[in-house]
Image: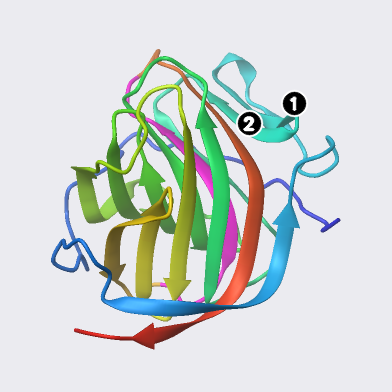
Amino acid sequence: MNDIRLRAPIACFALLLVAACGALPRQSLPTAAYRYQELLLDEHFEHGRAWPSYAGGADLWLGVTEGAYRIELHSKRYVWTQHDQLTSDVVIEVEARQLSAYDHNAYGLACRLDPANSGRGYFLLISGDGYASIRWGDGRALRAIVPAFPSQHIRQGAAHNRLRAICIGDYLALWVNDEFVAEARDQRASAGQVGLAGVMNYAGKQLSVDFDKLRVWSAVLDEHGS
């Protein structure tokens, strides 16, 4: 079992801003392919020692429960937990299941997170109401690289979704339920740590989401288009 340490979550009150920095034209097929290499992490959250818990009063709880890693968030912020291992070019996959009834949220994967726990890094997210986005976290806000847009591949509400994040070179891509959803090019971070994330845009509302079967591979890119 890998040694994993919980990083303290950070609040963000200016969430999901609309400035698009590196979005590629939206299309049904990706412009790049990739190859899996070495399996770096295979986490099934089988016991409470897998990822430590964090309790932030009545508004926040993160930890392993019922064989999954759960984020419980009741206030307007974004939160994350990150793995200690430094990585660069990776493919990350996780099984996510929204438990809460309120759909106006976001949750997903993060890559190239700052080891200093500043909140800087890439966030590849979906929402309970069927939207997807790719974001840059600067520690205070999640700024849009690919602004939120609806995707037919996302199962809405209290549902299960399989997420895949591609972070190779300057290429970022999000796949949901084995379907391509979004991609972008961005050069703000070339290495960092992988993580899980949750976002709530409205005070007093709840996000509850479980993550399981988290796997991370080193990977390389095969370009096949422009």
Q: Secondary structure at mark 2?
A: strand
Tell me what residue is drawn at x 70 percent, y 69 percent. 40
In the displayed structure, 210 sits above or below 203; it is below
Tell me what residue is drawn at x 71 percent, y 46 percent. 6
Q: Amino acid at mark 2?
A: Arg
Q: Position of residue 59 (x, y in %)?
A: 54, 19
Q: The C terminus appears in which quarter of the rendering?
A: bottom left
Magenta extent: 189-202
Q: Judge from the rendering whether residue 1 lies leftward or rightward of residue 111; answer left or right.
A: right
Q: Amino acid at mark 1?
A: Glu
Q: Judge from the rendering whether residue 162 lies leftward or rightward of residue 12; answer left or right.
A: right
Q: Which residue position is annotated with label 2?
A: 70
In the displayed structure, 171 sits above or below 18; it is below
Label 1–label 2 contact, CB within 8 A: yes
Q: The N terminus appears in which quarter of the rendering?
A: bottom right
Q: Position of residue 176 (x, y in %)?
A: 40, 49
Residue at the farthest left position: 25
Q: Nearer the viewer, residue 81 or 115?
A: 81
Q: Which residue position is annotated with label 1?
A: 66
Q: Position of residue 178 (x, y in %)?
A: 43, 54
Task: Name which quarter of the figure residue 206 lies in.
Answer: top left
Residue 13: in magenta span: no
In the displayed structure, 110 sits above or below 183; it is above
